Amino acid sequence: MLREYAMMENLKIAQDLEMYGVNYVEIRNKKGTDLWLGVDALGLNIYEKDDRLTPKIPDTIDVQQMKAQAREEKNAKQQEREKL
């Protein structure tokens, strides 16, 4: 029983760590920069290639550009569907 107890205590400590349960996926942004996409139970974060501990805070201009591009792509798909 001592081994099982020790394992449970270690898991309790580990789950409180900031990086517990994060799955990383290699991505590349439109500028060609290699990054990590961190996926966990709370959502998504983007990390620099050499730093998986500190999520990258998106630049507001980048966010605005991404939203504009997403709208354009959505409109293009909708127009394509209407043609069919």
Image (cartoon, grey):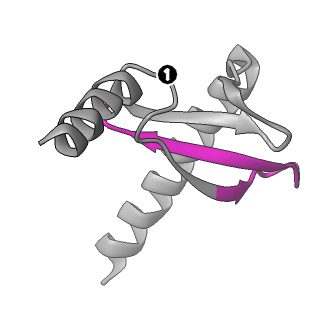
Does the segment drawn in magenta span residue 29?
A: yes
Query: Which structural element holds mark 1?
Result: loop
Name the spot of residue 72 as percent of width and height, x first: 55, 48
Horizontal arrangement in the rendering, residue 84 relative to residue 30 (left or right): left
Q: Is residue 61 left or right of residue 1?
A: right
6 w.r.t. 31: above or below: above
**Which of the two residues, 78 or 47, is positioned nearer the viewer here?**
47
Magenta stretch: give its range. Answer: 26-42
Image quadrant where one finds the N terminus: top left
Extreme left residue here?
Answer: 1
Q: Which residue reaches farthest bottom?
A: 84
> Picture quarter containing residue 48?
top right
Number of residue marks:
1
Q: Does the magenta portion include 33?
A: yes
Residue at the spot x=37%, y=19% of the render?
Answer: 16
In the picture provided, is 19 more to the left or to the right than 31? left
Q: Residue at x 18, y 43 (%)?
A: 4
The answer to which of 1 and 11 lies nearer the viewer is 1
Q: Is residue 15 left or right of residue 38?
A: left
Q: Which residue is mark 1?
A: 18
Q: Quadrant of the C terminus?
A: bottom left
The quarter holding residue 65 reads top right
How crowded pointer 1 is (Cα within 10 Å; few <14, some 14-19, many 20+) is rated as: few
